[in-house]
Image: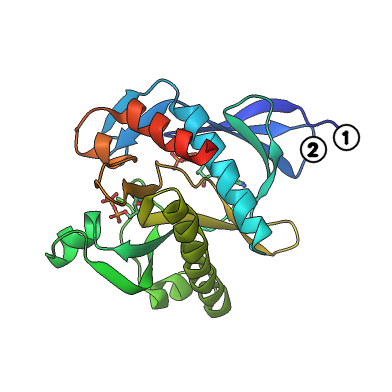
Amino acid sequence: MELRREQLIHKGKANNVFSTNAGDILELEASDRISAGNGERRDVIEGKGVVNNVISMYCFKLLEKNGIKTHFISEGSNECSKFVKKLDMIMLEVINRRYTAGSFCERFGCEAGVEIVPSGVEFSLKSDELGDPFIPKFAIKALGIATEEEIQYMEETTAKVSDILSEYFDSLGVRLIDFKIEFGRDMDGNIVIGDEISPDTCRLVDKVTGEKFDKDLFRQNLGGVGEAYRKILERVKG
Ligand code: ADP
Ligand code: UDP
């Protein structure tokens, strides 16, 4: 069956979600919208949607090749979109850290750039109202967000994803500092990775020069966001 987009069902901070002519498939479109501080600062970066979508699709294909289940089905109806399995999203942001950065340094008062071996996985509650707070595992269970087994699966899978993506970016001369992924349950109740894997959700820097290729440029108001995203796309395209 040829997939066709139907209604816009969710306009998120960065992505548009459409229903399709297949009940269990969505079309996820990366927009040029960018935001920081849970939507407090907003802008539009021309060309960001294409970059994020191409990189995201590449990463999902790479993970699938390595036996990791994701929601990715196929390229979408335009260069900013992809068709994905519709998931019942688990309201967690699963973060993996390979080097200290960002909120980790703020919370623990440490310097940035210290290697974390083995890489660490932590969970935040996905809630704009609450500012995506850190959530301990006992609370994930107590609040009925996920079971012990599901938490363990997400932790183990995220660590594997980290090693696969890190090896890949390393081959492009890029260091993966940290990233966020989201999981959801498919129609059969299996947990798979959803959402996106892009410079909006990963910290990526040049291994030699430390040049940033990710959303930190916007978060820190450093400028050059579009150019940096185009540069990382060039490396991914080879
Ligand atoms: P937000 O909604 O937090 O502003 P986005 O702009 O990225 O974030 O919007 C995309 C939304 O689609 C997110 O809420 C994300 O959890 C959700 N999503 C991602 N993949 C899927 C999927 N396969 N099935 C259902 N929802 C998804
Ligand atoms: N991240 C994300 N969405 C969020 C919060 C974090 O994609 O809502 C990503 C972020 O890009 C980084 C990693 O998760 O790669 C760790 O982010 P951190 O907890 O340090 O938070 P931040 O400094 O971005 O507030």
Q: CA distance from mark 1 to mark 2?
A: 9 Å
Q: In terms of depth relative to the viewer, which is nearer, 143 or 39?
A: 39
Instruction: Check the image and tell me how it is coloured.
Output: rainbow
| 128 lies left or right of 67 | left
Q: In terms of depth relative to the viewer, which is nearer, 7 or 167?
A: 167
At mark 2, the secondary structure is: loop
What residue is drawn where x is 44% and y is 48%?
A: 172
Evaluate whether residue 69 shows in this view.
Answer: no
Task: Residue at the far right: name it.
Answer: 1
Residue 136 location, quadrant? bottom left
At label 2, the amino acid type is Ala
Q: Residues within 10 Å of mark 2 (few under 14, many from 20)?
A: some
**Mark 2 — residue?**
22
Evaluate whether residue 99 shows in this view.
Answer: yes
Residue 23 locus on image (x, y percent): 77, 41
Residue 232 locus on image (x, y percent): 42, 37
Residue 94 location, quadrant? bottom left
Of marks 1 and 2, the one in the foreground: 1
What residue is drawn where x is 47% and y is 33%?
A: 234
Q: In terms of depth relative to the viewer, which is nearer, 127 or 49?
A: 49
| Residue 1 disc label | 1
At label 1, the amino acid type is Met
Residue 185 locus on image (x, y percent): 64, 59
Residues at circles 1 and 2 in contact by the CB criterion of under 8 Å: yes
